[in-house]
Amino acid sequence: MSTQTPASTTTDSTPAADAGDDLQRSGRDATATRHALVRAARRRFATDGYRATTVRQIAADAGVNVALINRYFVSKEGLFEACMLRTSDELDTQTPPRPADVEGIIARLVEHVVNAPDGDDPLQLLLLLRSSGDENADGIRRRTLEHFTKRLATAAGWSPTDPDTADLMLRAQLAIATMLGVVMLRTSAAVQPVASAGSDDLDAPLGEVFRLLLSRPV
């Protein structure tokens, strides 16, 4: 985890007292407000980048007072870390750490790329891919990717005490790189034909690539 420092109060914050009034007027409880801010921030960070995004924009997108970002996340960096943690948790939920269900893992990876279980799915993957240009933010992103790599490798059969499975860490990272690359081509780059390809077009070739990377030879 990074050390969070308070955000500047010059351009992107307002007095904390207003936040309490805003919270009372809006009728939001703390959990709903935090969720709305993380959702709005993930969209902004993924589409505009970390540096270009301001906390005022995020608060406006979420429909809350900007001071609530300081209240719940301390700073923009703290909010970015919360976004990455949520992305990691959602991917972990889809990839349980047990080496028994490679086909299930492959199906879930393909689903993240092709079927997008919810509207934020491609955006959360782009958030893992996009460099922020900020050293602390990039450190958070790198640790999230390393954590996801370890979870995926473990699910595919990697064990830190078994040298015969050591290559699965690299293979898991290559699978993640493939997943992120396809998402980037389909969303931000909109490269054809992959951008308009449907699940019928992509399920088989993506499954074959993931299977090659994550299945251990018998």
Image (cartoon, grey):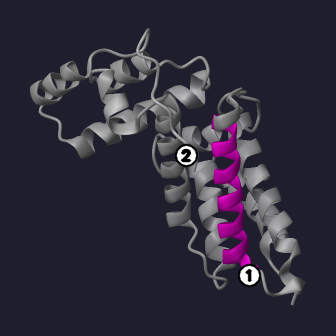
Viewer-side residue, 90 vs 9: 9
Query: Viewed as shown, does residue 75 lie left or right of 98?
Result: left
Q: Quadrant of the C terminus?
A: bottom right
Viewer-side residue, 62 vs 9: 9
Residue of label 1: 157
Residue located 55% across and 42% down the image: 3
Residue located 11% across and 33% down the image: 27
- The residue type indicated by label 1 comes to Gly
- Is disc 1 surrounded by few (<14), some (14 to 19) or many (20+) residues within 10 Å? many
Tell whether position 133 is magenta: no
Viewer-side residue, 40 vs 10: 10
Q: Residue furthest top?
A: 11
Residue of label 2: 84
Magenta segment's dominant SS is helix
In the rendered image, the vertical position of residue 70 relative to residue 82, given as above or below: above
Q: Position of residue 172 (x, y in %)?
A: 77, 64
In the rendered image, the vertical position of residue 55 relative to residue 87, given as above or below: above
Dividing the picture into quadrants, the one containing residue 105 is bottom right
Which residues lie in the magenta part? 137-159
Q: Position of residue 145 (x, y in %)?
A: 69, 53
In the rendered image, the vertical position of residue 143 relative to residue 36, given as above or below: below
Would you say residue 196 is visible in this rendering? Answer: no
Spatial CA distance of label 2 from label 1 is 25 Å
Q: Earlier in the sequence, mark 2 or mark 1?
A: 2
